[in-house]
Amino acid sequence: HLLSPPVQARSSSYNGEYGGGGGQRFSHSGYQLEGPITAIRIRVNRYYIVGLQVRYGKVWSDYVGGNQGDLEEIFLHPGESVIQVSGKYKYYLRKLVFVTDKGRYLPFGKDTGTSFNAVPLYPNTVLRFISGRSGSLINAIGLHWDAYPSDCSSC
């Protein structure tokens, strides 16, 4: 196997999955090449987080989840990053709160269920992409942290 370059400090970490069982697996790992997270869309109904979509650089990911409920959208400011994600789940994802390095607190969903709080393992790293499982709702979510892309030509 290839040896990793000795100078490169580890920066990637993972938290999850938070939620219940079932659903089809999804991952946005390919989208991180498009650039940093620049916007987030979350669909919510009275009880659950129904669906989500994330914009990486200028490119929106595929939408995952169901179609009932209201779609909410937030845009990050240029250079702003998500540095903490908390939320609640019971069978399905019920609440997500994104906290940014500009001090913004961006909540979605309902305040009920088992709590989780996720922060990156390494300093100066940010939310780079998400993964999880979905069907007609978001069953579970996973959070992938890494360094902010320094040479982002597309954003």
Image: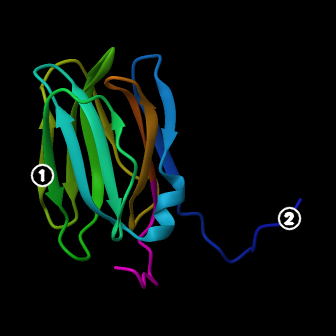
Neighbour tally class for label 1: few under 14, some 14-19, many 20 plus, Cα within 10 Å: few
Q: Residue at x 20, y 65 (%)?
A: 76
- Residue 48 position within the rendered picture, expressed as x and y whole percent measured from the top left: 20, 23
Which mark sits nearer the N-terminus, 2 or 1?
2
State the image quarter where residue 126 is shown.
bottom left
Q: Reply yes or no: does residue 152 show up in magenta.
A: yes
- Residue 64 position within the rendered picture, expressed as x and y whole percent measured from the top left: 37, 38
Q: Which residue is drawn at 51% across and 51% down?
A: 13
Q: Are marks 2 and 1 in contact (CB under 8 Å)?
A: no
Q: Reply yes or no: does residue 18 show up in magenta.
A: no
Secondary structure found at label 1: strand
State the image quarter where residue 112 is shown.
top left
Q: Which residue is drawn at 59% across and 63% down?
A: 10
| Residue 88 vertical position relative to residue 73 in the rendered view, above or below | above
From the image, which quarter does the N terminus lie in?
Answer: bottom right
From the image, which quarter does the C terminus lie in?
Answer: bottom left
The numbered mark at residue 83 is none
Q: Which residue is drawn at 39% across and 24% down?
A: 135
Q: Name the residue under label 2.
A: 2
Secondary structure found at label 2: loop
- Residue 86 position within the rendered picture, expressed as x and y whole percent measured from the top left: 26, 39
Is 3 on the left or on the right of 127, as rendered?
right
| Residue 104 vertical position relative to residue 72 in the rendered view, above or below | below
Q: Mark 1 points at which residue?
A: 105
Range of the magenta residues? 145-155
| Residue 50 vertical position relative to residue 47 in the rendered view, above or below | below
Q: What residue type is labelled 1?
A: Tyr
Q: What secondary structure is the magenta-colored segment mainly?
A: loop
Is 83 on the left or on the right of 71, as rendered?
right
Q: What residue type is labelled 2?
A: Leu
